[in-house]
Amino acid sequence: MKGFIALTTVLIILVIALLVGIGLGLRSISEMKMGLQKSQSSESYYLANLCAEQALMKLKEDSNYTGNETISTENGICEILPIEGSWTIKVSATSSNQIKKMKIIVSQINPQMIIVSWEEVPDF
């Protein structure tokens, strides 16, 4: 009888330890997925900013710049959409299935560029 109680106690302790181990493993996997998604999201954010800065430099060089071009990098694709109105620049970047969109409004180009707003937007 004493052996049965000892064996049952050991089995219960092992089951509890196994459940705790599985729970920690699943939580680790979930944390890793969230970290990867955050990294990919940051990558597309910086790609969108790169594209926006490229558009601003081209606009500074040529006030008749119309946009409407695609820039490809190792990490993703960025689109400069056609420039609207008085210098509203819209860019969309895609990297690892993460999409970021930026909208930049410029009020003056020369003698120095004045940016009224620069924001990430959910959609245009």
Image (cartoon, helix red, strand yellow):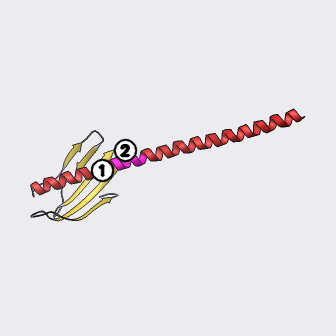
* Residues rendered magenta in the picture: 37-43
The circle on residue 61 is: none
Instruction: Identify the residue at image location x=27%, y=44%.
Output: 77
Between residue 1 and residue 89, name the one nearer to us: 1
Q: Is residue 114 left or right of residue 101?
A: left
Snapshot quadrant of residue 56: bottom left
Kindly identify the residue that appears in the image at 17 percent across and 52 percent down: 67
Q: Is residue 34 magenta?
A: no
Element type at mark 2: loop
Residue 98 relative to residue 63: left or right: right
Disc count in the image? Answer: 2
Query: Badge 2 is on which residue?
Result: 97
Residue 28 appears in the rendering: yes
Question: Which amino acid is tagged 2?
Answer: Asn
Relative to 75, say whether 104 is above or below.
below
Residue carrying label 1: 46
Name the chief secondary structure element in magenta: helix
Q: Position of residue 118 (x, y in %)?
A: 26, 61
The C terminus: image quadrant: bottom left
Amino acid on which the number 1 mark rests in the picture? Tyr
Q: Could one spot residue 66 in this view of the protein?
A: no
